[in-house]
Image (cartoon, coloured by chain):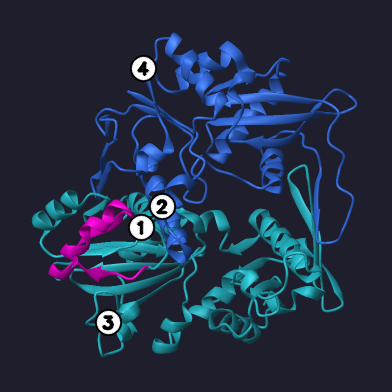
């Protein structure tokens, strides 16, 4: 089975990266794991000439041509928070090297002509929920949404929609909560920082992982919490996960949406109502798929490994 | 109504505003701080589309029905508004307002020069490496680019630069006329980059060829003179 070497970037013990490495090994696909915490010994250089990108990665005593890789999976964390760097001074040579390495790496994989999970530009849409929602609306229903800093607008929206949830507009502090009577006393704070309100849509949560080569994995999530990701915090029970038999048309819409956003590996959050209407809340460009695979046994990492390696797997 | 969103020190934008008004284009200047401070902002989004209403503190109102195009030079969330917050809250508010502005500008009807990316409000910002790569793929001859983690002497800056402005479907020279094949490449690059307003710098090869060096979605519009104003008028649909 022919497979292109894959470059894995991040912390090797982080479950999504670790599972991808294991899957690549099982596939017999070669890979190079670049441990962010060992960046002191890594060097990277690349050139762009007439639209073509070539370069060299020096790691573990080897010099590897960048154009030899077929795929890149990046799970890089903010390197400034690495234990090796967190307390170092800004002018520490190790810090300067780490800054330079991460700048060079991210500039390179953004233009690398092979498979990249996922490029930074594609991931940016998730930083603004209203921005992303307008793209999503071409493929799925979306909850009626209000972004506002005006308490009167928020009150009118609640009066019109009944049950309403609120959440952050960006990806930060993104916990969904229902707007209750207690929150009314705090609405005047909107003048300082706007909030996103949405009609509460009830139904079954389904997380769909899509891969650019057409593979789709859907997982149903049962939870009492408004936001199942925080079920353990918002309720006294964890969420319960199971494989979901996704209809072809729904799967196709998920693939088209991910492609429209330029995301090779996406985690798409759907909610399916009792009447069968499919709402999409968000497309996650850095899905922590390991949680879903660990709970259900769905072979997401194997499919990801196949894609990264450019292998034809059944 | 068309809008020009820019900081009060953005002289290229203000020059364009004055020039466009002389051409009869109705253009309102809105400062970034006016969008977020003290007024009322609301944007509704559903499966049928998006609508917005923004009431500014000076009484002006911007709504979906009124705005027909935007010259967008919005750099970032104004620091003057963020000064009232401390620590993690400051960072959080900055991210929230950036997300709000990106979502709003994305929804504005009509031509928007340039539409935002949630990471960069003024349009698609790219690293030099990416611009050089895209330019090569768009058919432009390019200055070779190299980036390395090792300490290496950087390239010398070009002795002379030539500049072209892509404004909508027009390629406007900044001084020296743009060769035909270069103009075609400029339009292809702007199209591929999703940036209808783009400034492109070229170095001159010893044989006189124009070699793409860098691009910016925030060009100095003044360099295009009256031709730039006419092109802006057309690109804004006025």
Labels 3, 4: one chain: no
Q: Please indicate, yes or no, whether residue B76 appears anywhere in the rendered image.
A: yes
Q: Which element carries disc 4, helix, strand or loop? A: loop
The disc at residue B99 is 2
**B207 and A187: which one is in front?**
A187
Which of the marked residues, 3 or 1, is nearer the chain's N terminus? 1
Q: Is residue B167 visible?
A: no
Residue A196 is a magenta residue? yes
Of all chains, the one bearing label 3 is A
Chain in blue, by letter, is: B
Which class describes the residues within 10 Å of circle 1: few (<14), some (14-19), or many (20+)?
many
- Report, in whole angstroms, how far the alpha carbon at label 4 lies from the one at label 1: 32 Å
Badge 4, how many Cα within 10 Å: few under 14, some, many 20+? few
For disc 2, the neighbor class at 10 Å (few under 14, some 14 to 19, many from 20) is many
Give, as a single range, the part of the protein colored magenta.
A174-199
SS for callout 1: loop
Indicate the position of residue B126 as horizontal and vertical percent values. 62, 46
Q: Look at mark 1 in the image and give the residue it sits on.
A: A169
Q: Are marks 2 and 4 on the same chain?
A: yes
Q: What quarter of the picture does the N terminus of chain A occupy?
A: bottom right
Using the image, tell me which numbered label, if any, was put on residue A234.
3
Q: CA distance from mark 2 to mark 3?
A: 26 Å
Q: Reply above or below: B116 against A96.
A: above
The alpha-carbon separation of the residues under discs 3 and 1 comes to 20 Å
Q: Which residue is mark 4?
A: B26
Circle 3 residues within 10 Å: few <14, some 14–19, many ≥20: some
Horizontal placement of B23 versus A227: left or right? right
User: Chain A appears in which tint?
Assistant: cyan
């Amino acid at each position: 089975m022919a497979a292109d070497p894959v470059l894995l970037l991040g912390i090797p013990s982080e479950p999504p990266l670790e599972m991808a490495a294991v899957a690549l090994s099982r596939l017999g696909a070669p890979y190079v794991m670049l441990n962010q915490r060992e960046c002191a010994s890594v060097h990277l250089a690349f050139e762009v000439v007439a639209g073509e990108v070539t370069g060299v990665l020096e790691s573990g005593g080897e010099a590897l041509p960048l154009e030899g890789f077929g795929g890149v999976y990046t799970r890089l964390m903010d390197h400034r928070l690495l234990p090796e760097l967190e307390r170092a001074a800004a002018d520490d040579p190790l810090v300067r090297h780490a800054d330079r390495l991460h700048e060079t790496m991210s500039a390179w994989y953004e233009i690398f002509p092979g498979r990249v999970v996922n490029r930074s530009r594609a991931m940016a849409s998730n930083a603004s929920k209203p921005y992303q929602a307008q793209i999503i609306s071409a493929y799925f229903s979306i909850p009626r949404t209000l972004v506002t800093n005006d308490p009167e607008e928020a009150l009118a929206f609640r009066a019109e929609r009944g049950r309403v949830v609120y959440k952050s507009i960006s990806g930060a502090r993104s916990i969904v909560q229902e707007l209750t009577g207690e929150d009314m006393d705090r609405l005047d704070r909107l003048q300082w920082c706007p909030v996103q309100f949405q009609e509460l849509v009830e139904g079954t949560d389904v997380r769909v992982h899509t891969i650019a080569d057409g593979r789709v994995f859907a997982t149903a999530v049962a939870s009492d919490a408004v936001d199942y990701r925080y079920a353990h915090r918002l309720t006294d029970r964890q969420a319960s996960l199971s494989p979901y038999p996704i209809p072809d048309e729904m799967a196709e819409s998920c693939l088209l949406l991910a492609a429209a956003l330029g995301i090779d590996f996406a985690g798409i959050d759907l909610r399916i109502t009792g009447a069968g209407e499919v709402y999409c809340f968000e497309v996650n460009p850095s899905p922590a798929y390991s949680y879903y695979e660990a709970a259900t046994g769905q072979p997401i990492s194997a499919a990801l490994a196949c894609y990264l390696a450019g292998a034809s797997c059944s | 109504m068309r809008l020009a969103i820019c900081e009060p020190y953005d002289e290229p934008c203000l020059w364009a505003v004055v020039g466009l008004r002389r051409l009869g284009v109705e253009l309102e200047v809105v400062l970034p701080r006016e969008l977020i401070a003290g007024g009322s902002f609301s944007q509704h989004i559903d499966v049928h589309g998006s609508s917005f209403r923004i009431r500014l503190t000076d009484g002006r109102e911007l709504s979906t029905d009124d705005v027909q195009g935007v010259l967008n030079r919005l750099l970032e969330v104004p620091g003057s508004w963020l000064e009232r917050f401390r620590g993690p809250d400051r960072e959080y508010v900055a991210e929230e307002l950036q997300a709000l502005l990106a979502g709003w500008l994305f929804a504005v009807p009509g031509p928007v020069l340039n539409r935002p990316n949630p990471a960069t409000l003024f349009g698609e910002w790219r690293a030099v490496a990416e611009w050089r790569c895209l330019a090569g793929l768009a058919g432009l001859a390019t200055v070779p680019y190299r980036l390395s983690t090792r300490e290496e002497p950087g390239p010398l800056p070009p002795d002379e630069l030539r500049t072209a402005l892509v404004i909508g479907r027009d390629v406007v020279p900044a001084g020296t006329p743009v060769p035909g094949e270069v103009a075609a490449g400029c339009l292809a690059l702007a199209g591929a980059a999703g940036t209808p307003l783009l400034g492109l710098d070229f170095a001159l090869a010893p044989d006189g060829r124009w070699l793409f060096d860098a691009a910016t979605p925030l060009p100095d519009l003044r360099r295009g003179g009256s031709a730039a104003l006419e092109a802006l008028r057309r690109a804004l649909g006025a």
